[in-house]
Image: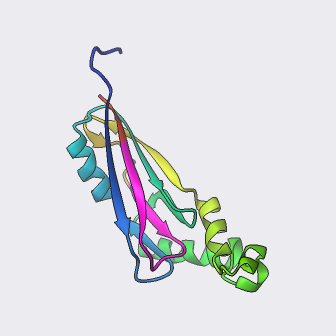
């Protein structure tokens, strides 16, 4: 179906300064609130971490799963052991956070239908902080009609 309406865009930034070095934060409601402010009824939402040691992903909001994700990252993907990574020879200690971001991903594109995020029944949008306790941001970019 084609339309004579012009494409609209809306940009918003979410800011985080986590209390822990690693946290998973449900940002679905904030994304939905900004979608409402955008006025877009049909289109897409891009949600992207603007830091190379953080992630944005879609999954289930269940604390046991969050624990499992953190354990999986620590035990299987990128253990927090600064001595094992060459990047940390630069004086940093966050190589594991970079690898975790690569594994989980730094952005998602979400469908917008009838002015709402068109997610599955258990899907929520999350910000994964892998090297926190400092100010970081996520960009929300909405495009559509």
Q: How is the image coloured?
A: rainbow
Residue 74 position in % (x across, y down): 64, 78
Q: Which residue is more in the foreground, 38 or 58?
A: 38
Q: Which residue is more in the foreground, 79 or 37?
A: 37
- Res 72 → quadrant: bottom right
- Res 127 → quadrant: bottom left
Which stretch appears magenta?
A: 122-141
- For the question of whether residue 27 can be seen, the reply is no
Q: Is residue 36 above or below residue 5?
A: below
Measuring 52% from the left and 62% from the top, which residue is drawn there?
51
Q: Is residue 30 above or below residue 39?
A: below
Name the residue furthest front.
Answer: 90
Q: Is residue 126 magenta?
A: yes
Q: Is residue 69 magenta?
A: no
Main SS category, magenta section: strand
In the rendered image, the quadrant that contains the C terminus is top left
In the rendered image, the quadrant that contains the N terminus is top left
Residue 38 position in % (x across, y down): 24, 41
Q: Is residue 143 left or right of residue 98?
A: left
Instruction: Tally the numbered discs.
Output: 0
Q: Is residue 127 above or below residue 111?
A: below
Q: Is residue 26 left or right of residue 105?
A: left
Residue 105 position in % (x across, y down): 57, 56
- For the question of whether residue 125 can be seen, the reply is yes
Measuring 22% from the left and 45% from the top, which residue is drawn there?
36
Measuring 78% from the left and 75% from the top, which residue is drawn there?
86
Q: Is residue 107 left or right of residue 3?
A: right
Residue 9 position in % (x across, y down): 32, 36
């Amino acid at each position: 179906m084609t339309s004579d309406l012009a494409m609209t865009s809306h940009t918003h930034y979410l800011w985080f300064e986590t209390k822990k070095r690693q946290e998973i934060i449900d940002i679905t409601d904030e994304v939905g609130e900004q979608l409402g402010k955008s006025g877009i009824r049909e289109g897409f939402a891009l949600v992207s971490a603007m830091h190379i040691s953080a992630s944005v992903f879609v999954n289930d909001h269940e604390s046991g799963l969050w624990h499992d994700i953190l354990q999986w990252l620590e035990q299987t993907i990128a253990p927090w052991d600064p001595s094992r990574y060459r990047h940390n020879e630069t004086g940093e200690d966050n190589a594991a956070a970079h690898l975790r971001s690569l594994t989980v991903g730094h952005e998602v594109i979400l469908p917008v239908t009838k002015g709402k995020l068109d997610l599955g029944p258990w899907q929520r949008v999350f910000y994964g902080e892998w090297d926190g306790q400092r100010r970081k941001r996520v960009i929300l970019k909405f495009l559509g009609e």
